[in-house]
Image: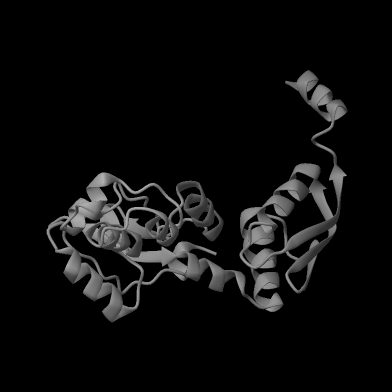
Amino acid sequence: MKIQDLMTTDVRSVGPGVSLKDVAALLIEHRISGLPVCDPEGRVLGVVSEADIVAKAGRESGRSGGLLGWLTDGREVEERKTTARTAGEAMTAPAITIGPLTSAHAAARLMIEHAVNRLPVIRGEELVGIVTRADLVRAFYRTDAEIEREVREDVIVRTALVPPGLVTVAVDHGEVTLEGRVDRRSDARVIENLAVRVPGVVGVTSKLTWRVDDQSRKYRRELARTL
């Protein structure tokens, strides 16, 4: 599943000069937790979020300790955020962005690695959408039939280039079972590794067999002699 299948395309964004009061109003009005900050040409500069507003509110109310730390997930608050007046001063920058054809698995990895809840989606330098952790959670909650179809059609046939019918796919509550015979052992490994990355898959049990073990030492020695 690609990000273009999950992202919100009606994206609200603000310029770096927009006041934090106006940012807070937009977050409340549209029931969202963060906004991309863009320059006049539409390039994404950063992201301003609820946590940035809380950092400012905590400083203004004189709370610099436990409550502020709790509301910002225990992260250290930069001094510039607590004194910020505009989106550009408060935003997290540079923005961590992603392309529309990137996989949901890669998006989840980026969010975890960078501890962010949302990723602006860009095509070239143009902002075309935004994807959030909630979008990825919704992607994970898929029917067994949807998972089976993606594994069979996208993973096995289109990506691994295994002809239809050689591998059967069964899915039960997100648990995928693969059975059949493929040409090479490496084909089986590719299918297993890609199947586990399909959104909604809990685990993969492979009962695949292969005609040629192209990962064995014997095979590699024989191949080397022919070169």
Q: How many marks?
A: 0
Quarter holding the N terminus? bottom right
Q: Is residue 96 above or below residue 176?
A: above
Is residue 21 visible in the rendered image? The answer is yes
Is residue 44 visible in the rendered image? The answer is no
Q: Nearer the viewer, residue 145 or 30?
A: 30
Q: Which residue occupies 14% across, 64% down? A: 19
Q: Position of residue 142 (x, y in %)?
A: 63, 75
- Quarter of the image where one finds residue 21: bottom left
Q: Position of residue 8 (x, y in %)?
A: 38, 72
Q: Which residue occupies 52% across, 53% down? A: 106
For residue 57, side relative to residue 139 (left or right): left
Q: Position of residue 13 (x, y in %)?
A: 23, 66
Quarter holding the C terminus? top right
Q: Position of residue 27 (x, y in %)?
A: 29, 73
For residue 180, side relative to residue 66 (left or right): right
Q: Which residue occupies 20% across, 58% down? A: 87
For residue 69, side relative to residue 26 (left or right): right
For residue 96, side relative to residue 206 (left or right): left
Q: Is residue 221 above or below residue 67?
A: above
Q: Nearer the viewer, residue 225 or 41?
A: 41
Q: Which residue occupies 53% across, 51% down? A: 109
Q: Nearer the viewer, residue 55 or 135?
A: 55
Which color scheme did the rendering employ for the protein?
A: one colour
